[in-house]
Image (cartoon, rainbow, N blue to C red):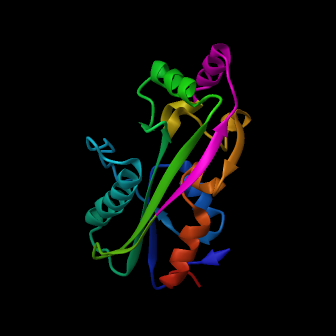
């Protein structure tokens, strides 16, 4: 377990329990504050550019909420799923979740995640993006409806959770597994070490 320098505050700007669990598995202590940033893609924006932009915006939004940032570092992160050039964010409803899973079934897709670490003054100290390739097994319509019926897909990019019930849908991953969950943990810890946030 890595310890955060007691002279610093480390804040995760995320409502995602998956990111909280990932960071908490190896770093302590840190705070969690929700950013409430509009995650709507910009027309024509590439997915890898979108996740970087949103990661920075989420961290900055939290810094702006702090009455006295002091010596702190804030982590923002974002994830999206891309298949055949289509950006598959969080589904709007059950029908949209079924549509996304129908697109993904039986083929490879890319998961882009980014994180940004900003200091208390809002300066971007580190910004990285990472891509993993995931293969989902072939599903029939009944299998898709059954999985969507669990409710798990509704707040997940691409309408599935690789670490949850949805793990039975995945045949293989090339690249970082934690990147698919929500953030490339190895890269994030390395960045925090370079910034001397961790002891």
Q: Nearer the viewer, residue 60 or 43?
A: 43
Q: Position of residue 185 (x, y in %)?
A: 59, 64
Q: Is residue 161 above or below residue 22?
A: above
Q: Which residues are magenta?
A: 129-151
> Which quadrant: the N terminus?
bottom right
Q: Is residue 187 above or below residue 92?
A: below
Quarter-of-image position of residue 67: bottom left
Which residue is depicted at the point 57% across and 31% down?
104
Q: Is residue 86 above or below residue 121?
A: above
Q: Position of residue 128 (x, y in %)?
A: 45, 66
Q: Is 146 covered by the magenta stretch?
A: yes
Which residue is depicted at the point 41% across and 58% down?
33
> Which quadrant: the C terminus?
bottom right
Which residue is depicted at the point 70% across and 31% down?
137
Q: Position of residue 149 (x, y in %)?
A: 60, 20
Q: Position of residue 40 (x, y in %)?
A: 31, 41
């Amino acid at each position: 377990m890595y310890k955060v320098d007691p002279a610093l505050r480390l804040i995760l700007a995320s409502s995602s329990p998956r990111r909280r669990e990932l960071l908490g598995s190896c770093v302590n202590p840190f705070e969690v504050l929700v950013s409430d940033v509009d995650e709507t893609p910009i027309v024509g924006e590439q997915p890898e550019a979108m996740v970087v932009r949103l990661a920075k915006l989420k961290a900055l939004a939290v810094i702006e909420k702090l009455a006295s940032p002091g010596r702190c570092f804030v982590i923002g992160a974002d994830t999206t799923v891309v298949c055949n050039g289509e950006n598959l964010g969080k589904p709007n409803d059950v029908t949209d979740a079924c549509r996304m899973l129908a697109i993904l079934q039986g083929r490879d897709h890319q998961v882009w995640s980014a994180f940004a670490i900003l200091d208390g003054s809002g300066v971007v100290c580190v910004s990285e993006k990472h891509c993993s390739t995931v293969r989902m097994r072939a599903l029939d319509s009944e299998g898709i409806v059954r999985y969507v019926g669990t409710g798990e897909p509704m707040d997940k990019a691409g309408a599935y959770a690789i670490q949850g019930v949805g793990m039975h849908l995945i045949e293989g991953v090339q690249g970082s597994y934690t990147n698919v969950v929500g953030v490339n943990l190895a890269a994030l810890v390395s960045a925090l070490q370079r910034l001397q946030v961790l002891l």
